[in-house]
Each structure stands twice: as structure tokens, then as C-alpha cells.
Image (cartoon, grey):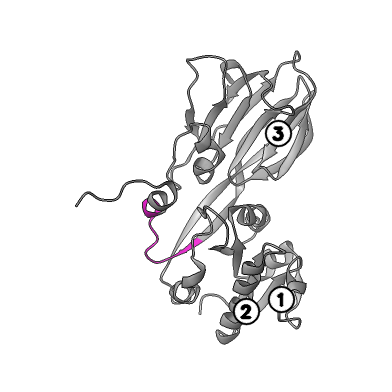
């Protein structure tokens, strides 16, 4: 059996998530697995004897983590779990479900495939971002989907310069910039007009947010590049960098934001039969075959 210890993670205060997690506990007990429950949801379940653990412990001690919820739940867990040698699978109890792709009605069948070795494992890279002030690192974090430089006020422009591997690319007046991984190309970046990037492509996209020009376009760059966003000193002081819309880092005029590929990777598991383009068709309402 490929997995002996399984971590269960879910969105607190969500009745359907609780139902799914209780079903999973029964499923993994039948498989003879050791079960670790994430501490924020343990008290909501019907199995008080299953011990509660934090995400770091789950990442360190489990072979597989099952995240029940929407893509937001997966993003929060993935930023921690990517630091460890653990496979991660998602059960969708949210809206879109690009990352949590197992349907709740198919849990037993789909997990049986994974336990029988009929699985596809994808390595998804993350982004690492640092905010530098006078060449000193002031704050940092990681992102699975995207790093966004934006103003603290809605519909407020800023001025900044973009450098790639220390080479000047352009300066811009806009609402900000989205630096996205292939995983994040179907998230916020897509809404801003960015390209959809196949997950195995080693690239990241730079997508301007409402630029004050007609010539600005998204750019794809090598994922091994370092992207630098240098904020002009003429900006107001309410600027921010967001990671997956979860983590917010403060930015002052004159700061430099450096984004590069993280050394950590997310091992995302799909049951056999998973097809990326099927997901796109279903989630984005693309047309089906003509014949």
C-alpha cells in the first residue's frame, strides 16, 4: 500500500466538509491507515479519538494529505505542505475546484484508484517573494498561485519598473502587476486577461492590472528568472504585495519586490483518468466536441 499515514484537512464551520471528512475517516480506517486530523477541524468531527495535529506535523509525518474544501483551502495548506515530502489530493467542496478536483460523490472510487497506484502525480512549483528596503529584506512569503503588487486603495494607480534578471523591461502606471505560476494561470491572472499555462510548463506570467496604455500585454518568462518590481518613490504609502490573496506584505515607495521560483514543490495527486483539458472545459464552460 503506497500510503500508511494520512492527514485530513478541511474548512472549519462547513457542514458538507464535515460530512466528507467523517466519511474519509471511515474509509482510511478500513484501509488500515494512521489518521492525523488538522487541529482547526478536529473538534467538529464525530471521531474525538483521532488526534489533532498542525499542518507542519502532518507534512512531516504523513504520506498523503487530503484537503476537503475549495481551492482556497488547498492554497492555504499547500504553502505549508510543499515544504515536506508528502502527496496532496483535493476533494472539492467549493466553487471552481481547479486544485480540488475529486467530486464528493466519487470519493471512494477515486481514492481506491490512488491507493491502487492508478494515479498521476504532478510537481507544481511555488513562487517565493521578498520585499526589500535599501537592499535589506523586510518581509517574505510564498505563493502557489500568484504574487500581486497592488495599491491599498481600490482603483488607484501606481508607478513601478519591471526588471527580469536585472535587465530593465519597462516602466508602467497601472493598478499593479500579477506574477503567476502555471497553477495560478486559471485564477486571478485569468480574470485579468492572462494566458492559461499548462501545469508542466516551466514558466511564469507577468500580467499588468489595468495599465494606463494600449500597448501593455501579458508576458511569459522562464520560471528560473528573477522578476523585480521596483516601486517609484512618487507613490503614496498604502501599497501591498499579496500571496494567493491570503498573505499581505506591506510595501513603501522605493521598495523592491523580488519574485522567483521557490525550491519547494507541491506534489499534487490526481486519480487515473485526470485530464487537464477536461477540467478547463468543465470549469470554464468551453465547447465540447462537434462530433
The structure residue drawn at horizontal position 66% and vertical position 57%, both measured from the top left corner, is 77
Point out the frontmost of discs 1 and 2: 1
Highlighted range, magenta: 269-278
The residue that label 2 is drawn on is: 25
Q: Residue furthest front?
A: 15
Seen in the picture, residue 83 relative to 35 is either above or below; the reply is: above
Mark number displayed over residue 124: none
User: Sequence-wise, which precedes: disc 1 or disc 2?
Assistant: 2
Q: Find residue 234 and report its horizontal and vertical position in percent.
A: 75, 13
In-front residue for pair 29/5: 29
Q: Find residue 243 and report its horizontal and vertical position in percent.
A: 67, 41
The residue that label 1 is drawn on is: 45
Circle 2 — which element? helix
Seen in the picture, residue 126 relative to 266 is either above or below; the reply is: above
The residue that label 3 is drawn on is: 241
User: Sequence-wise, which precedes: disc 3 or disc 1?
Assistant: 1
Amino acid at each position: 500500500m503506497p500510503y500508511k499515514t494520512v492527514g485530513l484537512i478541511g474548512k472549519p464551520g462547513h457542514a458538507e466538509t464535515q460530512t466528507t471528512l467523517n466519511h474519509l475517516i471511515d474509509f482510511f480506517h478500513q484501509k488500515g491507515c494512521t489518521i492525523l486530523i488538522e487541529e482547526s477541524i478536529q473538534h467538529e468531527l464525530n471521531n474525538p479519538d483521532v488526534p489533532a495535529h498542525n499542518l507542519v506535523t502532518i507534512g512531516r509525518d504523513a504520506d498523503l494529505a487530503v484537503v476537503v474544501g475549495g481551492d482556497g483551502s488547498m492554497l492555504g495548506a499547500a504553502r505549508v505542505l510543499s515544504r515536506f515530502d508528502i502527496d496532496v489530493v483535493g476533494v472539492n467542496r467549493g466553487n471552481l475546484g481547479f486544485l480540488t478536483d475529486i467530486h464528493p460523490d466519487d470519493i471512494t472510487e477515486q481514492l481506491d484508484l490512488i491507493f491502487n497506484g492508478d494515479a498521476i502525480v504532478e510537481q507544481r512549483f511555488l513562487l517565493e517573494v521578498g520585499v526589500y528596503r535599501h537592499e535589506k529584506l523586510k518581509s517574505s512569503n510564498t505563493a502557489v498561485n500568484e504574487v500581486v503588487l497592488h495599491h491599498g486603495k481600490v482603483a488607484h494607480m501606481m508607478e513601478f519598473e519591471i526588471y527580469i534578471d536585472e535587465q530593465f523591461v519597462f516602466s508602467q502606471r497601472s493598478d499593479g502587476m500579477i506574477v503567476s505560476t502555471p497553477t495560478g494561470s486559471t485564477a486571478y491572472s485569468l480574470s485579468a486577461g492572462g494566458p492559461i499555462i499548462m501545469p508542466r510548463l516551466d514558466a511564469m506570467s507577468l500580467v499588468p492590472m489595468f495599465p494606463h496604455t494600449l500597448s501593455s500585454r501579458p508576458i511569459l518568462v522562464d520560471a528560473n528568472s528573477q522578476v523585480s518590481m521596483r516601486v517609484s518613490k512618487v507613490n503614496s504609502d498604502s501599497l501591498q504585495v499579496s500571496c494567493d490573496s491570503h498573505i499581505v506584505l506591506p510595501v513603501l515607495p522605493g521598495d523592491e519586490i523580488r519574485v522567483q521560483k521557490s525550491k519547494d514543490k507541491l506534489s499534487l495527486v490526481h486519480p487515473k483518468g485526470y485530464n487537464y483539458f477536461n477540467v478547463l472545459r468543465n470549469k470554464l464552460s468551453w465547447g465540447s466536441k462537434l462530433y
